[in-house]
């Protein structure tokens, strides 16, 4: 049997990635889209796209009945769920098969068995795989040693997971994990297992057909994580020996054979400092990090999935799997590491990742990053013969990527890829705990940063001249009085101000003075000028960038955006977004109340206070869900609650006053 027309029951980069392979194989593709995704990249990559309505995942992409209805209406013969909730839903898999469609993935019974992490641990034990104990959250032993992980019994991706180091924190962690698991997977069941300190998170890719053939495609390491979600993945693992590697491979194959597994799956392990192996779980789907396995094996995993689903035998044996070189994947995410990994939303002004890398993405310039969906923008993958070379290639591609709009974790990724412990392969699951400085990583510094500011000024000046039809003939900054140059204050993407004065000689050359304005002396004269003086020559300005000479050094820089929303400037040293500050500060009316505001658009999923309550520093007031993550709104200081402005289930926008507080006089 050959598949003819495939419904891709997902969105974003994975939908685009599946469509590419299906197209190469001659399979027609049908996509689906919600209201906000009508012009999304994934809807344009398929042959046909079907509107399924709704704005939230629950109203659109998680409606299994609507997806099956679309598949049947479009005369599809198969459904690929990508990854996510439906990919691990036995009910959806069964419904697809019952509708007479081919399900691209393991069958419903296997998903049900292995998707329950407690049951999967029992199966692993029976198959002789080393594993750690799992305790139901409502039956914990009184002498349970700390630390522990609270985990959702269903699903994955770090949702419904909490690290607990103190028994006092356990109750709240179980409650939060239960709530998050129920919201993400429709199943609030959680369990508790020992947390292995200083471990590596290593997983083995397996795939099996319907003819009894099961192979592995090596291991991946994905230890560098934030909020239990992966940031950097690589293949092979840089920190295990061959004996451990072969133990992992054999364990994964043994478990897959024991349950009669079919299609692609991932068996995950923790590897302790001494090489001890502990089974974690099985992901019964394609993994986000699968491209690094494809890079080192030369195998297209989606193609294998489709061929297996069509009933074909695997086209290669274990002996024919050849590993070549090293691959590293970085997840580029719309979030701000320096603000506690707070997700970022808004319209993407620029998105260009160049270089000898693979870029799996579902976004581009003008895509709107919505709070309703996952914050993943792209996966950038580098492959080279040596690990350090792959890191260099990936680091440069990320550093020089032109990204404008929502904040991203780009600078943190760049910093990780150049950090000594990472380059030495010392990458355990607590890596970021030991390197908190990486969260505050910025773009270019020193002369490179100053040059990027000058480029932003040039872009702004050129735009002003183009808009000034009646005096475009005049040189930039022309005045009919002998005064100082044009002064302005710009802020970078960390909110740091930089003062600059432009003194133009003609429309091509100028002196740029950067630093604090000179202060007047007691006699009324100006103090000695300690500002940095730079000689500027403008060579060219076009729609996408500027060519300038700063102190005799040529700079070819991409520069897009507007002063109010931010001009993003990118060059070989990295990118910075500069925002022009208003010349005169506005004065708002006195606020009627004070209190915490929502840091981003989202939905209220927890209200933990009420009018009249007395709160103290650190108390949880409200919980906001955005981009599939929970964000706790905490009290700062002692206060009385005057009013709670939102209730459970309400939508909030960034900047909305959530809880009005009255702070007593000190």
Image (tube, rainbow, N blue to C red):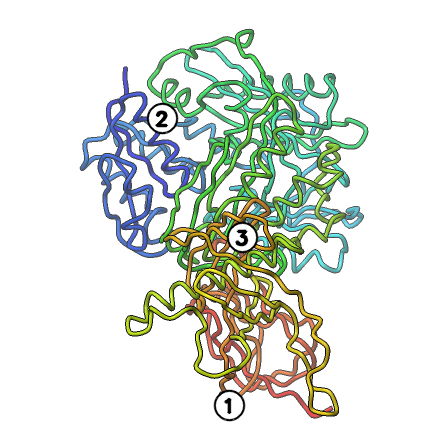
Callout 3: SS: strand
Pointer 3 residue:
549
Find residue 30 and report its horizontal and vertical position in percent.
26, 35
Asked if residue 140 lies left or right of residue 20, the reply is right
Above or below, comparing residue 347 to residue 523 in the picture: above
Question: Which structural element holds mark 2?
Answer: helix
> For the residues carrying marks 1 and 3, which lies nearer the camera in this image?
3
> Cα distance, mark 2 to mark 3?
45 Å
Residue 192 image-quadrant placement? top right
State yes or no: discs 2 and 1 in contact (Cβ < 8 Å).
Answer: no
* Distance between the alpha carbons at the discs numbered 1 and 3: 51 Å
Among numbered discs 2 and 3, the one appearing first in the sequence:
2
- Please tell me how crowded label 3 is: few (under 14), some (14-19), or many (20+) other residues with Cα within 10 Å: many
Residue at 47%, 57% (x, y): give it: 406
Left or right of residue 144, residue 237 in this image = left
Instruction: Report the residue marked by disc 2.
Output: 21
x and y percentages locating residue 1 in the rendered image: 28, 15
Q: Nearer the viewer, mark 2 or mark 3?
A: 3
> Which residue is the site of mark 1?
592
Q: Pick the residue in front: 10 or 514.
A: 514
Question: Which element carries disc 1, helix, strand or loop?
Answer: loop
x and y, in percent, of residue 32 in the image: 28, 43
- Using the image, determine if residue 55 lies above or below residue 242: below
Q: Residue at x 37, y 37 (%)?
A: 15
Q: Residues within 10 Å of mark 2 (few under 14, many from 20)?
A: some
Which of the two residues, 499 or 385, is positioned nearer the viewer here? Answer: 499
In depth, the one of 254 and 537 nearer the eye is 537
Residue at image position (51%, 27%) is 265
First in residue order: circle 2 vs circle 1:
2
Kindly indicate the quadrant of the structure image that contains residue 221: top right
Residue pictured at 60% horizontal, 71% vertical: 499
Tell me the CA gap for discs 2 and 1: 57 Å
């Amino acid at each position: 049997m050959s598949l003819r027309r495939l419904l891709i029951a997902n969105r974003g980069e994975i939908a685009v990635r599946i469509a590419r392979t299906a197209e190469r194989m001659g399979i027609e593709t049908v996509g689906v889209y919600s209201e906000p995704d009508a012009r999304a990249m994934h809807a344009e990559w398929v042959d046909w796209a079907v509107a399924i309505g709704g704005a939230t995942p629950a109203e659109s992409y998680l409606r299994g009945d609507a997806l099956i209805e679309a598949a049947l209406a479009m005369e599809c013969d198969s459904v690929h769920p990508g990854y996510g909730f439906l990919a691990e839903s036995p009910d959806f898999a069964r419904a697809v098969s019952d509708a007479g469609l081919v399900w691209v993935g393991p069958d419903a019974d296997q998903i049900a068995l292995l998707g329950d992490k407690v049951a999967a641990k029992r199966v692993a034990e029976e198959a002789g795989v080393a594993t750690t104990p799992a305790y139901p959250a409502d039956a914990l032993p009184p002498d349970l040693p700390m630390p522990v992980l609270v985990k959702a019994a269903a699903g994955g991706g770090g949702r419904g997971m909490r690290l607990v180091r103190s028994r006092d924190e356990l109750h709240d962690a179980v409650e939060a994990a239960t709530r998050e698991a129920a919201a993400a997977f429709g199943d609030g069941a959680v369990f508790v297992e020992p947390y292995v300190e200083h471990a590596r998170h290593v997983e083995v890719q397996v795939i099996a057909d319907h003819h009894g053939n099961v192979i592995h495609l090596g291991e991946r390491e994905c230890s560098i994580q934030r909020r239990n979600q992966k940031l950097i993945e690589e293949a092979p693992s840089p920190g295990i020996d061959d004996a451990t590697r072969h133990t992992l491979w054999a364990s994964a194959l043994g478990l897959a054979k024991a349950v009669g597994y079919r299609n692609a799956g991932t068996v995950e392990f923790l590897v302790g400092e001494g090489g001890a192996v502990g089974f974690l779980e099985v992901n019964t789907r394609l993994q986000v990090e699968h491209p690094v396995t494809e890079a080192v094996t030369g195998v297209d995993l989606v193609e294998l999935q489709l061929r297996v689903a069509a009933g074909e035998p695997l086209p290669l044996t274990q002996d024919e799997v050849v590993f070549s070189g090293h691959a590293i994947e970085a997840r580029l995410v719309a979030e701000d590491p320096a603000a506690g990994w707070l997700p970022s939303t808004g319209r993407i002004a620029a998105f260009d990742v160049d270089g000898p890398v693979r870029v799996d993405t579902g976004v581009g310039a003008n895509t709107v990053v919505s709070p309703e969906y996952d914050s993943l923008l792209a996966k950038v993958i580098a492959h080279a013969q040596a690990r350090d070379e792959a890191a260099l290639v990936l680091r440069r591609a990320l550093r020089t990527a032109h990204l404008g709009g929502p904040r991203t974790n780009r600078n943190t990724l760049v910093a990780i890829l150049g950090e000594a412990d990472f380059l030495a392969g010392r990458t355990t699951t607590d890596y970021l705990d030991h390197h908190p400085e990486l969260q505050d990583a910025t773009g270019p510094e020193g002369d490179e940063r100053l040059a990027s500011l000058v480029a932003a000024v040039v872009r702004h000046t050129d735009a002003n001249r183009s808009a000034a039809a009646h005096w475009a003939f005049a040189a930039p900054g022309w005045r009919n009085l002998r005064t100082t140059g044009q002064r302005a204050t710009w802020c970078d993407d960390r909110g740091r101000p930089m003062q600059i004065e432009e003194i133009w000689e003609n429309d091509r050359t100028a002196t740029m003075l950067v630093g604090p304005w000179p202060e007047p002396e007691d006699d009324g004269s100006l103090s000695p000028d300690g500002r940095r003086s730079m000689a500027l020559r403008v060579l060219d300005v076009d729609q996408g960038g500027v060519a300038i000479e700063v102190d005799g050094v040529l700079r070819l820089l991409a520069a897009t955006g507007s002063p109010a929303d931010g001009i993003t400037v990118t060059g070989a040293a990295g990118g910075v977004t500069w925002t022009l500050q208003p010349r005169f500060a506005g004065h708002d009316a006195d606020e009627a109340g004070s209190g915490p505001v929502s840091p981003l658009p989202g939905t209220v999923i927890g209200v933990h206070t009420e009018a009249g309550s007395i709160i103290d520093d650190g108390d949880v007031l409200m919980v906001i869900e955005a981009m599939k993550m929970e964000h706790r709104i905490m009290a700062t200081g002692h206060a009385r609650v005057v009013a709670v402005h939102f209730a459970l289930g309400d939508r909030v926008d960034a900047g909305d006053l959530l809880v009005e507080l009255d702070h007593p006089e000190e």
